[in-house]
Image (cartoon, rainbow, N blue to C red):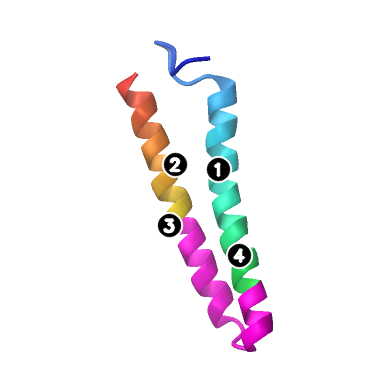
Amino acid sequence: MSGASPQGPGLWQLVTLGSTLLGFVVGGLVIGLLLDNMTHASPLCTLIGLGIGIVGGLLTAGLQIRRFLKG
């Protein structure tokens, strides 16, 4: 599987895109929860971790989508 077809990304590429976004969000959330448990700063680290995960996921998804659009 190399790149996107003329019709657009395939199913596997869309699944990869979604799982990447989910991985960043869940990863940021888990790291934030762990830091909150260690520092007792709840919910500060959870919110920061979630925000970083969302931004990182969206940036990565945006780069992947840009690659799909270039064809």
Reading the image, the residue beneath label 1 is: 20
To which quarter of the image does residue 45 belong?
A: bottom right
The crowding category of the residue bearing disc 4, from other C-alpha atoms within 10 Å (few below 14, some 14 to 19, many at least 20), is: many
Vertical position of residue 29 compared to residue 64: above or below: below
Disc number for residue 29: 4
Quote the CA–CA distance across marks 4 and 1.
14 Å
Which badge, 2 or 1, is on the more N-terminal residue? 1
**On the rendered image, what quadrant is the C terminus found in?**
top left
For the point 55% across and 43% down, the residue is: 20
Asked whether the residues under the numbered discs 4 and 1 touch, taking CB atoms below 8 Å apart as contact, a structural biologist would say no
Magenta part of the chain: 34-54
The secondary element bearing badge 4 is classed as helix
The extreme front residue here reads 38
Where residue 43 appears, as percent x and y from the top left, is 59, 81
**What residue is pinned by disc 3?**
55
Kind of element beneath mark 1 = helix
Q: Which mark is first along the chain, 3 or 4?
A: 4
- Residue 39 in magenta stretch: yes
Residue depicted at 34% across the width and 25% down the height:
69
Q: CA distance from mark 2 to mark 1?
A: 7 Å
Query: Marks 2 and 3, Cα distance to the nearest angstrom?
Result: 10 Å
**Which secondary structure dominates the residues rendered in magenta?**
helix
